[in-house]
Amino acid sequence: MYTTLLHQYQLVLSARTALFDYCETVKTEDLLRPLATFNNESMITQLMHVANCYLFWLSKSIMQQQRPYFKNEEHQNLTAVRNAYGQVDLVMNDFLHHFTDSLGQQILITRPDGSQLTRSPFEIFTHAITHEFHHKGQVMNMSRQLGYIPVDTDVVRE
């Protein structure tokens, strides 16, 4: 199962690279532009939200590590965003190595609001990557609203 999840994450990385390469064609001021249609969030704040969710679900909740969250004010350009995702990749690597033989193990998770739920590392892995794809779609939509023509950033693309 470990090899399968590692391969799946490599597909996520390929799609993420396509997204970041596309974002390189977007002006920095547009990457930072809050959009009312997205609760006054920007493309960069959406990307940083996803990076922080990886930290919350994989690192803090499942592996019980105390890593600081990424701060939006420190990520005001695509280079800083890419660097943050480099850290996310290290967290994912640690996560997959840690749970190589116990991806189905049920773990009690406490959310920031104090509520609790029980999930397996496999479920959390799936949640984290699908969450990224959800927000990737939002980023593409945001760019369209700003007048750009999005490219294909799916796992299967030309």
Image: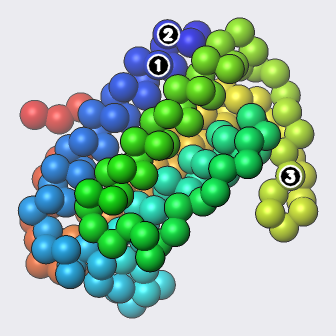
Could you say whether the residue bearing mark 3 is in a helix, strand or loop? strand
* Percent x, y of residue 69: 60, 59
Residue beneath label 3, please? 110
Q: Is 146 on the left-hand or right-hand side of 102?
A: left
Q: Is 149 on the left-hand or right-hand side of 64?
A: left
**Which of disc 1 and disc 3 is earlier in sequence?**
1
* Percent x, y of residue 49: 51, 63
Cα–Cα gap, marks 3 and 1: 26 Å
Badge 2 local density, few (<14 within 10 Å), some, or many (20+)?
Answer: few
Badge 3 local density, few (<14 within 10 Å), some, or many (20+)?
Answer: some
Nearest the viewer among 13 and 158 is 13
- Location of residue 157 (image quadrant): top left
Could you say whether the residue bearing mark 1 is in a helix, strand or loop? helix
The three-letter amino acid code for the residue at tag 3 is Thr
Nearest the viewer among 151 and 67 is 67
* Percent x, y of residue 89: 45, 36
